[in-house]
Amino acid sequence: MTTEKIIAVDYPLQQDLMLMDFWRRQTLQDFENTLSRVRSACKEANALRVMHDFHAWQRSPREYVRAWEGMLAACEKQGFRAIPCLFNRWHDKTWDVGGIYLEQLIPDLSWAYQEGFYQRFLEDVMLPYADDTRILLWDACNKPLGVYPTQQDDPLMARFYELRWLRDMYCYAKKCRISQPIGLSIREDYDAETLSALSRCCDLYLLSPYLLRPDKTAAVMQCRAEGKPIRYVHEVNA
């Protein structure tokens, strides 16, 4: 089977806060109340795509892990399976919500770089749930290479280092025997070269059908040609 319908609600629902601020301000009661509203409004939804934030975890790991476990329990109670999105690489001049920036991926570009920075985060957020049936699949990164999907002139070797990070993270998760599929959320306008490079960093692609246009079906065709499964994530606005 190459496709499977997932009707997922993105969380957080709003984009008026940076992800780090959202994780540090929300309470479990806030989350449970939101889930109840989502379930009432979207009875067909079967998954919740939870956007994680490395920087919120970095500031208070224990509190973050406790919050994440509480969220998983609440999802199970409401009949949602979780799609944890571990990192965000989608950035925008107007609606940026944070995530990972190039300074963290390119050696010697700035003091923010740290080799293997993701490992302790995954040890807390991913590895304890390697066989947890509450997890439908993992979204390793939202829109990797998204700010330069077809860039050719790359003096910083940004694509190389971002792909190295994604590949290292994927191999690390597999080495740790994560049983659920590991995906990447892609855009419909990625070219064949980019998709081919990303195919080494995931088990499947996540693609939102509302982005598909007749002139942008090459991404889907390329995925199928490579035998890479596609999961169509119908994001519901609750």
Image (spheres, helix red, strand yellow):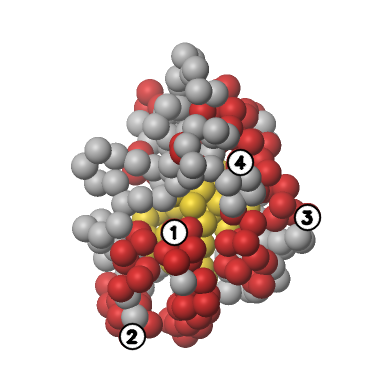
The kind of residue tagged 3 is Lys
Observer-side mark, 4 or 2, equals: 4
Q: Position of residue 141 (x, y in %)?
A: 51, 48
Say whether marks 1 and 4 touch (CB < 8 Å): no
- Residue 146, quarter of picture: top left
Residue 138 placed where, x, y %? 57, 58
SS at mark 3 in the image = helix
The disc at residue 165 is 4
Q: Nearer the viewer, residue 143 or 111?
A: 111
Report the amino acid beneath label 4.
Answer: Trp
Who comes first in sequence, dot 3 or dot 2?
Answer: 2
Q: Earlier in the sequence, mark 1 or mark 3?
A: 1
Location of mark 1 (residue): 55
Q: Given the image, on which type of amino acid does mark 2 rest?
A: Gln
The picture places residue 92, in percent across and down from the top left corner, at 29, 39
Q: Label for residue 29?
A: 2
SS class, disc 4: helix
User: Disc 3 and disc 2: Cα gap in Å?
Assistant: 36 Å
Q: Quadrant of residue 27?
A: bottom left
Specify the label residue 139 is tagged with: none
Q: Name the residue: 51% across, 57% down.
A: 86
Mark whose residue sits in front, 1 or 4: 1
Q: Earlier in the sequence, mark 4 or mark 2?
A: 2
Mark 4 → mark 2, Cα distance in angstroms: 35 Å
Which type of secondary structure does the marked residue at label 1 adopt?
helix
